Amino acid sequence: MERTADKSHKGITNSIKKDVINLSNLALLITLLALVAVFASLSPYFLTIQNLYAIGLTISVIGIVCIGQTLCLITRGFDLSVGAVAAFAGMVCAFLNNAGVPLRVSIIISLLTGALIGLLNGVLITRLKINALITTLATMSIFFGGVLIISKGYSLFFADPAFLGLANSTIFSVPTPIIILILFYVVFYIILKYTVFGRYVYAIGGNPEAARMSGIDVERLQMVIYIISSLLSAFAGLVLASRMGAAQTTAGSTYALDSIAAVILGGTSLAGGKGSVLGTLLGVIVIGVMNHGLIMLNVPPYYQGVATGIVLIIAVLLQTSNLRGKK
């Protein structure tokens, strides 16, 4: 038993090493180190523990969202509704808690609401054959509107102060959201790398028709993926609301662009069938470090969107040139 466990541990360790050494991941690591070096030289506070924790807290929410986006992109899909789902889940939780619903029940209902939005996306895309881009753009508009309807345009605070502990507590002196982020990535790394579900995800992205002919229920799996994406976004929305101390109407407004940029930067192919959560995590960290560094240099916050957009264009251009080179 010990030998088997040891072999399994070594197999996972070797697999992670191979993924890190992957050229695109290696390029991201070099980019990350370069960014850190630049910002550290420009600001003496950049490499302090407090600032590193601040970066970790910033990327912990969008990082969770990006896992679901990775699954969608690997299977040739998109989910533009991630930010709206995050905002809506946080707002539903705050509304219910303020209405006297116990905190735990409010959280469960909020997560179920997220899952139902994912189911709606999945049904529209797989059963009614509406384009994923159009579907999730529509649900994004619907649920951002829902946020404003529930809140009447104002932030909602939570009646139960215990909710704030979700994102403002620590485990072994490390902020809880960072621990949660790491656990999510470890779990989904194993799922994609070592389970039948993971193999099916890549098979669908590589060639949906071939996957269907081999007996894979493509539509059902795609539906599950959209449910997972929305469920993760809902959870991320709760973490964000806890961290901010309230459910805010502007929550998640940039998550669609940020998540797609991070996932593509992390090496997930727009053509489907290729990508990893490890690459996505690196992409999330690079964008997080870039945005946080700009803030520390007193660059106005609205320039972050400009920087993220430029990163997305560069990532897509690199992917396109690589695909042309292979052809």
Image (tube, rainbow, N blue to C red):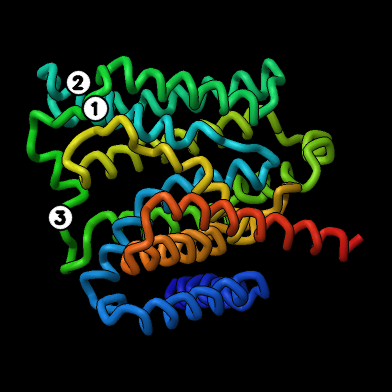
Question: Looking at the image, which residue is at 62% across and 34% down?
Answer: 221
- Decide which of tag 3 and tag 2 comes sooner along the chain: 2
The residue under label 2 is 96
- Where is residue 105 drawn, in percent x and y? 20, 25
**Is 289 drawn above or below residue 209 in the view shown?**
below
Question: In front: 8, or 286?
Answer: 286
Q: Is residue 80 visible?
A: yes
Q: What residue sits right under mark 1 in the picture?
A: 93
Q: Are marks 3 and 2 in contact (CB under 8 Å)?
A: no
**Which of the 4 image quarters holds residue 216?**
top right
Residue 212 numbered tag: none
Q: Is residue 183 left or right of residue 27?
A: left
The residue that label 3 is drawn on is 169
The answer to which image quadrant residue 22 occupies is bottom right
Q: What is the spatial separation of the Cα atoms under label 3 and label 2, in whole angstroms?
A: 23 Å
The three-letter code of the residue at mark 3 reads Ser
Q: Position of residue 278 (x, y in %)?
A: 53, 63
Q: Position of residue 296 (x, y in %)?
A: 31, 67
